[in-house]
Amino acid sequence: MASHKLLVTPLKALLKPLSIPNQLLLGPGPSNLPPRIMAAGGLQMIGSMSKDMYQIMDEIKEGIQYVFQTRNPLTLVISGSGHCALEAALVNVLEPRDSFLVGANGIWGQRAVDIGERIGARVHPMTKDPGGHYTLQEVEEGLAQHKPVLLFLTHGESSTGVLQPLDGFGELCHRYKCLLLVDSVASLGGTPLYMDRQGIDILYSGSQKALNAPPGTSLISFSDKAKKKMYSRKTKPFSFYLDIKWLANFWGCDDQPRMYHHTIPVISLYSLRESLALIAEQGLENSWRQHREAAAYLHGRLQALGLQLFVKDPALRLPTVTTVAVPAGYDWRDIVSYVMDHFDIEIMGGLGPSTGKVLRIGLLGCNATRENVDRVTEALRAALQHCPKKKL
């Protein structure tokens, strides 16, 4: 029998059925879910340490190796978003006073700087205005000056729409005895990426963008060089939850009996497994082509409306997330709100250093179609006609 009266009563909204609007998500992520992935999310739970779950985990690892184009045995899933994977990489590789070189040309580089500082690393940002990218010469100057143990670059900077070239950077880093860490959250599946051939030591991505899986899981892989750095550290990583030695064991990466570390998000992993299966069935090169063609069509439709693409060089435009300069006289918030309120389409404004400068339109996975381009550009046409415009 209860010994105290309840102080809190149920919220009335919780006594009603859950109602979800039907929206087309054409922002920088998350993306809409294909039927097969939604169906996976409705499957029954199984034990998180059962042999059936271990089989699913092994299939996921193989799927990650395929989409990353790597043979690294130390390949696994982090129970958390892409931010969590970034933090996992940094807390395991960096020790206090380690030199850390960061390409900070958008919000993800800024976040890497923040985490590196919290760890106590000596952080050296290479700061660029939104829209900028890094050349081999610029990075080599930073490597020579700061002698870092780790370089961070964002392959697909979703806050600015920049696609960072990667060829040659791994070889350059290794010449200076530096590891290369790459964020591919916004680029994976949408543009060519070759972890092993490009000499990337640590690569991570997220589930919710071109993979079309629910947010909350992230993919990560470590080269043998990165593993050696992590496994020979003098101090324990600051995070137990993100300790790669524990996670490697739990994900079957060390050929030892698996030991409990944390309760993994079983249902989310079903969905991630199916998302990797879908891209395997389509083929990576076909997925890259789909995003490239959809983005080119979008660029043409946007320019026909008189809008200016934020990234001027076509070779540096991220196919999955297109940035458009906010048209003169308009408030970006009015445009975003109009497109959602009248067309049930999500696009977004800038983020971090690009706030107020751009609109962001995402064509991610199954959403990368000409039909969706036509829908969003017609919505933008209407927004430009009906949203208030200040006289310049």
Image (tube, rainbow, N blue to C red):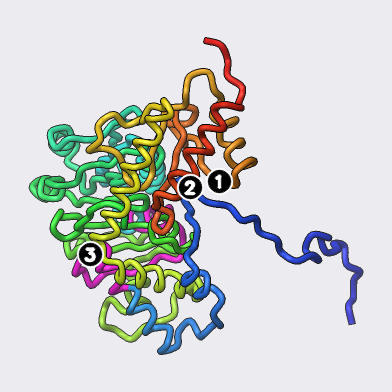
Of helix, strand and loop, which one carries label 1?
strand
| Above or below: residue 192 compared with residue 314 | below
Residue for badge 3: 227
Instruction: Report if the CB atoms under discs 2 and 1 are less than 8 Å apart.
Output: yes
Residue 359 in percent (x, y) is at 46, 34
Check disc 2 and give the amino acid type.
Answer: Leu
Q: Is residue 125 left or right of residue 346?
A: left
| Above or below: residue 323 compared with residue 20 | above
Total count of labels: 3
Of helix, strand and loop, which one carries label 2?
loop
Nearer the camera: disc 3 or disc 2: 2
Of helix, strand and loop, which one carries label 3?
helix
Q: Which residues are magenta?
A: 61-89
Of residues 373 and 338, the one nearer the viewer is: 373
Residue for badge 2: 26
Query: In the rendered structure, which disc, 3 or 1, sits on the residue that comes first in sequence?
Result: 3
Q: Say which mark, if any, is on residue 345.
A: 1
Neighbours of disc 3 within 10 Å: few (<14), some (14-19), many (20+)? some
Q: Residue 290: which quarter of the image?
A: bottom left
Query: How many angstroms separate mark 2 from mark 1 (CA)?
Result: 7 Å
Q: Residue 300: which quarter of the image?
A: top left
Q: Is residue 197 visible?
A: yes
Of residues 359 and 118, the one nearer the viewer is: 359
